[in-house]
Structures are given as structure tokens and as C-alpha cells.
């Protein structure tokens, strides 16, 4: 499973992108469960953003959903943080 | 036949309906071919305007938070919350108005920053809080984990502690004031947060952010550094701040962060679908116009240039989708109304001309 996170906007207006390929990872099933939960709560179009707020685009195996601060679900928040920290 | 089909038949240019995914529109809006980029951009702008309008209607339609009974009207009413590294707002209340400073320097800085912004609005412009009606000021600090951002959510300010690139967002007072100024814009000109009106929204926040910093430090336009977010970049980052109003595009140039993308004039205007249509990028153009005016007039920037910007923002003469040109023309009218045909008028026309925004 390939999980990509694109973060745009923010006070600095600087974009970040990272992705994680879970195949072969010992924790692949945890990633998969988290990604599925995050995507299920995402939207097909970018939600209403707030001034200086981050916007996110989560892509899991080709399917893209959108979400934005400050209204992330716990799974979205965790997944975004993990991908941006551990991904390349 | 849908309304979109009818619109497409009537329109001279093709109309993209909302069935086209926004990320495709983003891509199209960046296309070199204006036949592709133009309509995509218009659709994105209309969509963003609609969404922002819906949100702001929701926010502004809500009953206003009641000011405390003992509010004299010329005193701020601040409440600070600690989000405790979670992403739920507002968090736990840690300091109310008039409470003594506690152990948490972040809370104390935010409290002082809100106070300084309230003070400038009142003393320089006679405005009681961001809504002109004593609106209580609410901020949450320690938001999220490893969170390198600050934002205005339509009701309150939110500050993260930073990440590997940025330090605590309450460190620069201009960043605190920038967020609060988004509230000022929301209650006045209410510029749509996309494209040129979005860049105006951002620029107004930088202008008032910088003015608050200059007010706190009692600096003249010549003494000010005109930087936004000085002291915010982590030590490993090569740069002085996040933005420079004096020299847009020169604030940082770093291996990880890249180079400051801000243009200083319309000739270098950046067309993009990202960052809400480049709101934090093209704000460099009106930012520099303000800097040029303030330094041409000299003295305390909030007295001349700041007054003209404040009059423009609060004058009611601008649409929510105002362009740079609309804004520039409104500043000229505001300067005329306030100062007549004096040096302000001349310096203002020159400033806009230098950044390539027409006023005629």
C-alpha cells in the first residue's frame, strides 16, 4: 500500500509531500487500518479552509481524499503526522 | 440539462462545472495555455468564494460572544487556553483577563501579544477589538504535536510549538498580531481567501502584524526591520524570517525550505492553484507597496500609511473579491479623504507604481 500526504498552505505557505510504501513493513497491517480509517472520513473535494490553516491531500493506492485543519479526525491526524515524519 | 450546461452554452469561454475535481482544476489553472488556465482559475475562485462565504456567514451569523459585564470597552478581554498538544479546541483554560502571569512563557507571550494588538487598534485607530465592539480575544497554545503553524479558525487564534523548521509560533509578536488581524479583516472587508483577494487578506495581516511589532518597540518606519516572523526559523534554517515586506523574496534561501517565493512587483506575479492560489506568495506585492509608502512618509508607520490602510479596510467600499487594483484605488480615495492632496497622495501613487499596480 502506498500512502502519500501533501500538505499545503499554512502561515509560511510552504508545501510538503511525503509518502510511505507499506509493502514488506512489519507494521503494514497497522498502517493499512489507519489509512483506511483516515480515507473513509475524508472528502472528495477540498473542505473549507481557514486563514493560515494547513490543507491536506491524502492519496492511498491512487485514491485521493481531502481534509483541513482544524477539523481532522484522530486517524487523519495520526496518519498525516506519521507519513510526514517517517515518509520520504 | 443542468445549470452548468446552460452556463457553458451562454459563456464565451468554456465553463468548468464542479464535477471537475479541484486538483484537476489546480493543475489546469497552472497550465501555460490561457484557454485552459483562465476558466479553471475562475471556477476555482468562484468555488473558493462560495465556500468561504458559507463559512463566514456561519461564523458571522452566530450570536456574538457577549463581552463581560464589567468591560469598560477600552480594555481587552483575553482568554488563553492550553491545547495540551492535542488538536481539540480550545483546550484547558490557563489564563483569563487580569490574571497574573504564570510559569508558561508561551501563554504569557500570547497574552501580551493579544494585548499589544488590542492597544494598537484602540490607540491608533480608535477601534474596540477586532470587531469594533469589544470582541473577547481567545487563543489556544501548544496545539498539536510537532506542529509548525499558527492559524485563525474564524473565532480564535491557534498556535503550535513548532517542528524541525519552525520554533514556537508565539515568539514573534508580529505573528500573533498577524493571526488576530485575520479577525479584523473578517469583520471588515472580509476578503475571500483565494487568489488576489486572498493575497490582500494575507497582506493586511502582515501589515498589521508589522505595525504591532513597531508599536511595541516604539520604532519609526526607518528603524523597523519590516520582517514577518523574525526569530521563528530554527537554527538549522538559512534565513532571517518568513517574509520581508521591504524586499519580498529575500527572507530565506535554504536547502530544505527552498527559496522565499514572494514577488516584489506585478511583473513577477505567481499564478498557481496551490496555497489557495498563492495567498502567501503574491502578498509580497501589496506588502512592499505599504513599506514604500511608510518609509516615504517617515515617522511612525501606523500614523500615516497605517491609517490609510485601516481606512481602506474598514471603509466599506471594497467587494470581498477585490483585486490588487481595486484595493490600490481604494487606498488613493482613502488617503484623499483623510489627508487631502498632500505628500501622502503623491507617495502612495508612487508606491503602487513601483510595484506595478495601476491606480488610474
Image (cartoon, rainbow, N blue to C red):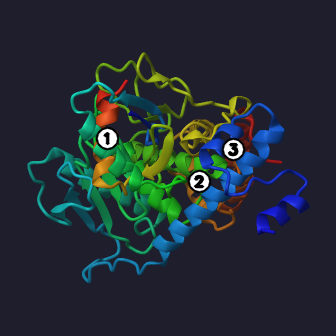
| Disc 3 residue crowd, few under 14, some 14–19, many 20+, Cα 10 Å | many
| Between B169 and B112, the one nearer to me in the picture | B169
Query: Can residue B198 be seen by looking at this rendering?
Result: yes
Query: Can residue B162 be seen by looking at this rendering?
Result: no
Coordinates of residue B303 in the picture (x, y in percent): 52, 51
Coordinates of residue B166 in the picture (x, y in percent): 32, 32
Q: Secondary structure at mark 2?
A: helix
Residues flagged by tags 1 and 2 on a common chain: no
Q: CA distance from mark 1 to mark 3?
A: 57 Å
For residue B304, above or below residue B81? above
Q: Quadrant of the N terminus of chain B?
A: bottom right
Residue ID at (53%, 54%): A44
Identify the image quadrant of residue B62. bottom left
Tell me the mark number nearer the camera, choosing from 1 and 3. 1
Q: Secondary structure at mark 3?
A: helix
Q: CA distance from mark 1 to mark 2?
A: 51 Å
What mark, if any, has residue B309 been given in the picture? 2
Dot 2 or dot 3: first in sequence order is: 2
Left or right placement of residue B285 versus residue B208 in this view = right
Q: Which residue is mark 3?
A: B348
Residues flagged by tags 1 and 3 on a common chain: no
Tell me whether the residue at label 2 lies in contact with that at label 3, contact meaning CB atoms closer than 8 angstroms.
no
Tell me the mark number nearer the camera, choosing from 2 and 3. 2
Q: Which residue is mark 1?
A: A32
For residue B231, above or below residue A45? above
Residue ID at (52%, 67%): B56
| Between B106 and B144, the one nearer to me in the picture | B144
| Between A72 and B181, the one nearer to me in the picture | A72
Amino acid at each position: 500500500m502506498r500512502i502519500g500526504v501533501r500538505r499545503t498552505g499554512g502561515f509560511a505557505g510552504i508545501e510538503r509531500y511525503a509518502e510511505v510504501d507499506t509493502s514488506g513493513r512489519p507494521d503494514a497491517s497497522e498502517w493499512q487500518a489507519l489509512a483506511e480509517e483516515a480515507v473513509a472520513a475524508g472528502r472528495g473535494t477540498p473542505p473549507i479552509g481557514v486563514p493560515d490553516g494547513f490543507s491536506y491531500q491524502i492519496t492511498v493506492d491512487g485514491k485521493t481524499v481531502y481534509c483541513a485543519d482544524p477539523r481532522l479526525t484522530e486517524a487523519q491526524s495520526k496518519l498525516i503526522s506519521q507519513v510526514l515524519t517517517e515518509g520520504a | 440539462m443542468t445549470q452548468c450546461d446552460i452556463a457553458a452554452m451562454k459563456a464565451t469561454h468554456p465553463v468548468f462545472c464542479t464535477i471537475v475535481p479541484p486538483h484537476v482544476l489546480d493543475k489546469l489553472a497552472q497550465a501555460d495555455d490561457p484557454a485552459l488556465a483562465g476558466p479553471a482559475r475562475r471556477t476555482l475562485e468562484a468555488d473558493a468564494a462560495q465556500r468561504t462565504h458559507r463559512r463566514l456567514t456561519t461564523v458571522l451569523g452566530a450570536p456574538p460572544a457577549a463581552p463581560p459585564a464589567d468591560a469598560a470597552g477600552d480594555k481587552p478581554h483575553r482568554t488563553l487556553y492550553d491545547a495540551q498538544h492535542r488538536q481539540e479546541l480550545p483546550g484547558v483554560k490557563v489564563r483569563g483577563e487580569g490574571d497574573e502571569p504564570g510559569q508558561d512563557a508561551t501563554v504569557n507571550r500570547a497574552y501580551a501579544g493579544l494585548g499589544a494588538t488590542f492597544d494598537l487598534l484602540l490607540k491608533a485607530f480608535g477601534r474596540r477589538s477586532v470587531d469594533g465592539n469589544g470582541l473577547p480575544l481567545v487563543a489556544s497554545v501548544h496545539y498539536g504535536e510537532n506542529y509548525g503553524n499558527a492559524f485563525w479558525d474564524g473565532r480564535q487564534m491557534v498556535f503550535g510549538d513548532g517542528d524541525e523548521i519552525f520554533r514556537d509560533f508565539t515568539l514573534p509578536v508580529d505573528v500573533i498580531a498577524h493571526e488576530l488581524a485575520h479577525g479584523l479583516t473578517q469583520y471588515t472587508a472580509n476578503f475571500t481567501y483565494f487568489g488576489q483577494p486572498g493575497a490582500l487578506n494575507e497582506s493586511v495581516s502582515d501589515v498589521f502584524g508589522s505595525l504591532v511589532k513597531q508599536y511595541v518597540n516604539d520604532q519609526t518606519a526607518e528603524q523597523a526591520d519590516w520582517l514577518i516572523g523574525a526569530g521563528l526559523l530554527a537554527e538549522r534554517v538559512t534565513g532571517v524570517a518568513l517574509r520581508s515586506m521591504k524586499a519580498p523574496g529575500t527572507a530565506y534561501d535554504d536547502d530544505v525550505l527552498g527559496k522565499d517565493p514572494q514577488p516584489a512587483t506585478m511583473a513577477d506575479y505567481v499564478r498557481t492553484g496551490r496555497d489557495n492560489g498563492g495567498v502567501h506568495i503574491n502578498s509580497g506585492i501589496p506588502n512592499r507597496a505599504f513599506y514604500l509608502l511608510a518609509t516615504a512618509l517617515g515617522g511612525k508607520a501606523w500614523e500615516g500609511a497605517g491609517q490609510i490602510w485601516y481606512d481602506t479596510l474598514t471603509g466599506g467600499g471594497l467587494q470581498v473579491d477585490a483585486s490588487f487594483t481595486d484595493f490600490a484605488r481604494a487606498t488613493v480615495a482613502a488617503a484623499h479623504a483623510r489627508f487631502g492632496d498632500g505628500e501622502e497622495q503623491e507617495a502612495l501613487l508612487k508606491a503602487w507604481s513601483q510595484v506595478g499596480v495601476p491606480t488610474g
